[in-house]
Image: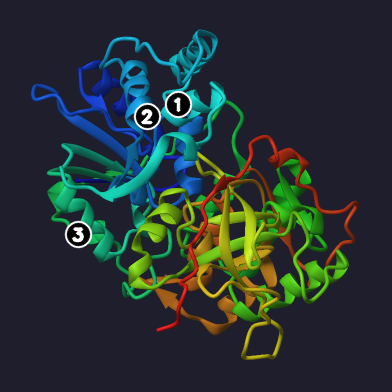
């Protein structure tokens, strides 16, 4: 079944309340970080999102969400720590162990009481993921109930994978967003029969009206053109500080919140301008530069390494901050934004595209590993499923889409693009109207991300070619 509705219609709130009610009814909640032994008389629930960022938005609401990859592949715990995990999850007695002191066990128990995360509890006891997770395996046993947020991002293959795992599957999605590439404008819930789609049509407002949501919903008016909409944005900016009429791109925001664009050429120009104003050399990355994972380039014989990377959050589309070079050539220390265990060290292939050049510049690369594009600007398509406190939308690109007159699923493309871009903003929207870049007020920073050491994910290089 699918529950659909536009931004502000209550989808996420409904998901959170359903989770609470189902848990109180005695259903076991399975997260991606630990799965207790299944009890014959208890059903199971997993709450999923297509991206790390989307899952982290739910976790901030107290919902133990994880990514689809973390449900397809389950962690294998060291037996000593498996007993501790069972005790924390309430399915075993307190273990007598030399692995952790009584004080460390108490810290783990206190953490788990407030945050239902086994890795988080073990981290509070002084451990890293590599201390207690020995590997990953493809899920063999099905689960009972699955909730999927941001299901407008699912492609047909992911949907079929989920249907194999969950006999009961509930999709939450926004029909006004952009469909996945190669899906012909259709979303997976569009194929469900009408009785299985519940549409939330009422928009619930906060005590203080949200001007960002007001703008997003104004796009559904067929009589509003681009120029009229821009006047609405300008008017909202004059009345409310949560909307900003921007004369230039704020470069300080780009390190953690990418500029959202439509055209690839715009994305590449903004990325290179960002690197130039920060004085980044062509042959190296600066600590603090943002990256976007573009997939994994690993041969089949390194399948276990692929599972390690994906399970730790390095999936296609993941947002990453570069923390510096690793100990081996071609390796990078990385902070995966929104991941439950965010700091990793992995072999990296970094590609920086140049304006008017077909081949990207590669400052350094391992022979295999995770591939990255620069993340100071991203296309609106790639931004789906993510949210940031402040979002900058590059309006000249949307104007270009409006001038082209293209449509998708019966609606002008520029309106779909604008709707997705605007609804990525949690608290503040900057509508950038000119092709200019502000000067940075300081250098890139990573000190706020260094709270935890990077978990080693060494990708063994092959000893021989072929």
Q: Residues within 10 Å of mark 1 (few under 14, many from 20)?
A: some
Q: Residue at x 82, y 63 (%)?
A: 248
Give how far across and how far down residue 221 sits, in percent.
Answer: 48, 59
Q: Residue at x 45, y 55 (%)?
A: 309
Q: Earlier in the sequence, mark 2 or mark 1?
A: 2
Q: Which mark is residue 16?
A: 2
424 up-or-down from 32: above or below: below
Dots 2, 1 in contact, CB < 8 A: yes
Q: Residue furthest front?
A: 463
User: Quadrant location of the C terminus?
Assistant: bottom left
Q: Residues within 10 Å of mark 2 (few under 14, many from 20)?
A: some
Residue annotated with mark 3: 160
Q: Residue at x 28, y 32 (%)?
A: 35
Q: Nearer the viewer, residue 209 or 56?
A: 56
Residue annotated with mark 1: 62
Q: Nearer the viewer, residue 462 or 193?
A: 462
Query: How far is the residue under mark 1 from the one under mark 3?
Result: 28 Å
Q: Nearer the viewer, residue 328 or 251?
A: 328
Q: Nearer the viewer, residue 29 or 81?
A: 81
Q: Residue at x 47, y 22 (%)?
A: 115
């Amino acid at each position: 079944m699918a529950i659909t509705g536009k931004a502000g219609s209550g989808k996420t709130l409904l998901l959170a309340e359903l989770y609470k009610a189902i848990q109180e009814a005695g259903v076991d909640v399975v997260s991606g970080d630990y799965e207790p032994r299944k009890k014959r008389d208890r059903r199971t629930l997993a709450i999923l999102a297509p991206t790390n960022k989307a899952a982290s938005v739910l976790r901030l609401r107290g919902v133990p969400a994880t990514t689809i990859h973390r449900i397809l592949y389950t962690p294998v715990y060291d037996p000593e720590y498996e007993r501790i995990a069972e005790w924390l999850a309430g399915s075993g007695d307190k273990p007598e162990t030399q692995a952790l002191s009584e004080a460390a066990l108490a810290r783990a128990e206190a953490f788990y009481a407030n945050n239902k995360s086994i890795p988080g509890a073990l981290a509070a006891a002084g451990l890293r993921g590599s201390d207690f997770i020995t590997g990953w395996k493809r899920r063999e046993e099905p689960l009972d109930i699955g909730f999927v947020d941001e299901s407008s991002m699912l492609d047909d293959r992911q949907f079929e994978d989920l249907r194999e795992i969950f006999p009961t599957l509930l999709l939450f999605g926004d029909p006004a967003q952009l469909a996945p590439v190669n899906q012909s404008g259709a979303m997976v819930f569009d194929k469900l029969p009408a009785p299985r789609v519940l549409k939330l049509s009422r928009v619930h407002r906060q005590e203080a009206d949200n001007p960002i949501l007001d703008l997003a919903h104004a796009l559904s008016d067929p009589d509003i053109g681009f120029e009229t909409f821009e006047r609405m944005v300008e008017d909202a900016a004059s009345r409310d500080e949560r909307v900003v009429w921007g004369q230039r791109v704020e470069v300080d925001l780009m390190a953690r919140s990418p500029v959202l664009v439509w055209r690839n050429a715009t994305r590449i120009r903004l990325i290179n301008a960002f690197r130039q104003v920060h004085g980044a050399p062509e042959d190296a990355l600066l600590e603090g530069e943002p990256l976007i994972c573009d997939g994994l380039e690993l041969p089949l014989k390194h399948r276990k390494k692929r599972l390690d990377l994906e399970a730790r959050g390095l999936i296609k589309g993941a947002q990453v901050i570069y923390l510096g070079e690793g100990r081996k050539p071609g390796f990078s220390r990385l902070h995966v934004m929104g991941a439950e265990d965010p700091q990793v060290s992995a072999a990296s292939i970094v590609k920086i595209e140049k304006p008017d050049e077909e081949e990207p510049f590669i400052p350094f690369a391992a022979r295999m590993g995770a591939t990255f594009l620069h993340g100071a600007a991203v296309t609106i398509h790639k931004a789906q499923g993510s949210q940031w406190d402040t979002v900058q939308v590059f309006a000249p690109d949307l104007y270009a889409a409006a001038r082209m007159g293209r449509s998708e699923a019966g609606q002008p493309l520029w309106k779909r693009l604008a709707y997705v871009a605007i609804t990525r903003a949690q608290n503040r929207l900057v509508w950038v109207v000119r092709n200019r870049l502000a000067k940075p007020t300081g250098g890139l920073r990573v000190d706020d991300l260094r709270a935890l050491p990077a978990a080693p994910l060494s990708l063994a290089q092959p000893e021989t070619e072929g």
